[in-house]
Each structure stands twice: as C-alpha cells, then as structure tokens.
Amino acid sequence: MFAKELIDLEKVSKEMSDKEILRFGLAAELDAINFYEQMAEYTDDEHIKGVLLDVAKEEKEHVGEFQTLLLEKDPQQVEELEEGKEEVMEMLGK
C-alpha cells in the first residue's frame, strides 16, 4: 500500500529528478488517501470518521497539484494520459 523507496536523485538528471519528485509526491498522496479512507471505514466514531474523510479530501487536492505540475514538466505524460482515457472510453462504448 505505501510507497517504500525514495529515489536516488544523484543518479538522474535535474530534469528527470523534478518529474520523479512529482511522481513520488503523487504516490505518497494516493497512499495517504487510501490510508485515511480505510481508517474511516474502521471507526464507529463519527467525529473521527469525519476528520479522516476531510483529510483524505485534502490529499485529493494535493494529487491535483502534483499532477498539474507533472503535466507541465512532462509532455509525454500528457499524451499517454489522453491515450489511456481514449482506450477506456472505447472499452466503455463511449
């Protein structure tokens, strides 16, 4: 569930390290969303559940921030995301 390894930034170019930093940030935020939503399912305390789900919602915003920056840094990522979307829409008959 949780991303376990940091990248060795000394082994990649500056351009690549920025993209890797953003991808690691995305992975960390997605892990956090899963964690908070899972913990919300385990508690019967509505106050705790509410806080956990609110924090998960904030993490989703962080995903958007990291993804926006990544798409600015990596035009290939933009192309691949669009191709993936098109494939899914075709599979869904849309």
Image (spheres, grey):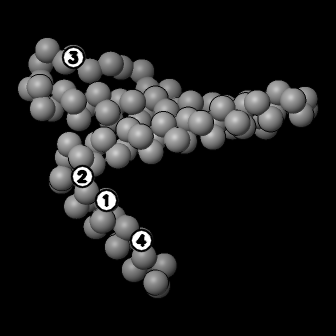
Give the residue at the far bottom of this rendering.
93
Distance from disc 1 to disc 3, alpha carbons, whole Å, reads 26 Å
Circles 3 and 2 in contact, beta carbons < 8 Å: no
Question: Which of the marked residues, 1 or 3, is nearer the chain's N terminus?
Answer: 3
Kind of element beneath mark 1: helix
Mark nearest the camera among 3 and 2 is 2
Circles 1 and 2 in contact, beta carbons < 8 Å: yes
Question: Which of the marked residues, 4 or 3, is nearer the chain's N terminus?
Answer: 3
Residue 94 at x, y = what percent?
46, 84
Bin the neighbour count of mark 1 within 10 Å (Cα to Cα): few under 14, some 14-19, many 20 and up: few
Question: Which of the marked residues, 1 or 4, is nearer the chain's N terminus?
Answer: 1
Kind of element beneath mark 3: loop
Which label sits on residue 77?
A: 2
Mark nearest the camera among 1 and 3 is 1
Q: What residue type is labelled 1?
A: Leu
Q: Which residue is drawn at 15% across and 32% down?
A: 16
Distance from disc 4 to disc 3, alpha carbons, whole Å, reads 34 Å
Q: What residue type is labelled 4?
A: Val
Distance from disc 2 to disc 4, alpha carbons, whole Å, reads 16 Å
Which residue is tagged 4? Answer: 88
91 to 44, vertically: above or below: below
Q: What residue type is labelled 2?
A: Gln
Question: Which of the marked residues, 3 or 2, is nearer the chain's N terminus?
Answer: 3
Which residue is tagged 1? Answer: 81
Which residue is tagged 3? Answer: 8
Q: What residue type is labelled 3?
A: Asp
Residue 25 at x, y = what percent?
39, 30
Kind of element beneath mark 4: helix
Bin the neighbour count of mark 2 within 10 Å (Cα to Cα): few under 14, some 14-19, many 20 and up: some
